[in-house]
Amino acid sequence: MLGLAFMTFTGCVKDYADPARATQDKISESTQGLTGVAVSLQSRYASGRGNIYNTITASGFLANEITLLNQGNTAELQLSLGGNSLDGGNTVMSGLWSNSTKIIYDADYVIAKSGSIADKSLVSGLLGYSTIFKSLALGDLAAFWEKVPASSGENVTFITRNEAYLKIIGDIDKALSAISANPISAAFLGTIPAGIDIPNTLKALKARYALYAGNYTLALTSANAVDLSKKSVFLSTSINQNGIFGAVTSTNNLWQPIDDTFGLPVGLRPEANDKRISFYLSINNTIAPKWRMAGFAATLTSEWPIYLPGEMTLIKAEALARQASPDLVNALVELNKIQTKKPSQDPLGVGADLAPLVGPFTQAQILTEIFRQRSIEMYISGQKLEDSRRLGRPQTERKRNFVNYPFRERDQNPNTPADPAF
């Protein structure tokens, strides 16, 4: 695979260039080289102990979706305990930090250098594809830390999570504008891994982060722009393997689902005949643990969704419920699309297939139901900690609100903010 080789640091980006490889200046002259750097973003994000593993593990423990099987896994043990047991030395969190800042650095490089390319249909592909991974990586940082780096380099300053979400939205708008002006060439699409619908994914991520930023009007219009008949996924292979299957499902020595309650409190748990239970979980009645990963982590080559179509429907429900004049009637309509959806009606096969919810509901009841449905529909998506905070769930349902900054970031950067109280 073509790509720019970089050295890895735990702290914010200082100098990633490897002098033993092609220099950045030489690569900037090559569209093939820039494409190689862009393509490498997916492997770094999705494979092995990349962002998918780290976000799902962190959110899963801190928001009570998963249970630890082996206390010899120190980083996962700390996450499972939460509280003061989790500090800046945790390797899952420091790995997420360093990997995310590396992805952002590489994506920014491709975006900046692509401006000199004459083929604008190739440029729009580079911009769109790189922006997806930059958005995901910056969003992952904002999911777990109170503030995130404003840029790459030494002694960088920090911005708030909300500022990060606005930055993501701005980047996505630029990419979508480029694609609208010059549709992505078939030649570019032939050079990247299959599975990702670039325009649809950008619109979906815009909806996600607009919701997290509290811009409900934009979240609603963005979610409405997503084609829910399509899916956008990371396709796993025997080489670029499904990271959760490789680390969790196949070993059964790290963590597994907490049980068929999905970690939800009494009153919010899935109904017994909810078909999403059998989608996400498998049962082993012979050897403990009973509940095991299935769904998108069922096999070595299982595809992993970048977003779920159901997430877009639930964004619509929340945006409608949170408007200045809440539209609870139509919020319930959107909720019932999730409640009654059959697996065969979903491009990813996720469906509850239940009787519709019957209102009327208050705004608080609607938001509680949205949290419940997101926790089931989007199980093990890495979003539950954010959902728990945003939707005002009790503190007792979380083991931390935010995590400490990595020690090496604090050691190297005097601008590193204070660690959170909890």
Image (cartoon, rainbow, N blue to C red):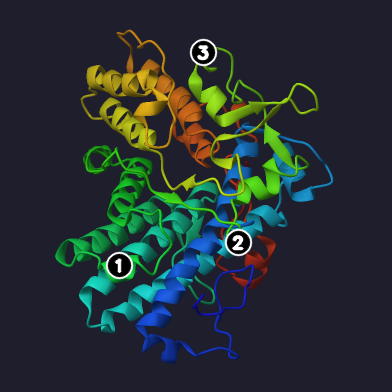
In this picture, is 143 found above or below 328?
A: below
Looking at the image, do the residues carrying marks 2 and 3 touch, with CB atoms under 8 Å apart?
A: no
The kind of residue on which mark 2 rests is Ile
Q: Nearer the viewer, mark 2 or mark 1?
A: 2
Give the percent coordinates (x, y) of residue 126. 33, 70
> Where residue 336 sits: x, y (%)?
33, 19
- In the image, taking residue 395 as reference, residue 211 lies left or right, namely left
Residue in view at x 48 percent, y 66 percent: 41
Left or right placement of residue 81 versus residue 112 in this view: right
- Is 408 placed above or below 352 here? below
Q: Which mark is residue 239?
A: 2
Which quadrant holds residue 355? top left
For label 3, count other residues whose C-alpha is less than 10 Å away and answer few (under 14), some (14-19) or many (20+). few
* Res. 250 in view: yes
Q: Secondary structure at mark 1?
A: helix
Q: Which residue is mark 3?
A: 273
Q: Disc 3 and disc 1: Cα gap in Å?
A: 43 Å
Residue 76 against residue 184 in the figure, above or below: above
Q: CA distance from mark 2 to mark 1?
A: 24 Å
- In the rendered image, the quadrant that contains the C terminus is top right
Amino acid type shown at disc 3 = Asn
- What's the amino acid at mark 1? Gly
SS for tag 3? loop
Residue holding disc 1:
125
Circles 3, 1 touching at the beta carbon (< 8 Å): no
Q: Quadrant of residue 18?
A: bottom right
Q: Residues within 10 Å of mark 1 (few under 14, many from 20)?
A: many
The structure residue drawn at horizontal position 44% and vertical position 55%, both measured from the top left corner, is 136
Q: Position of residue 244 (x, y in %)?
A: 62, 46
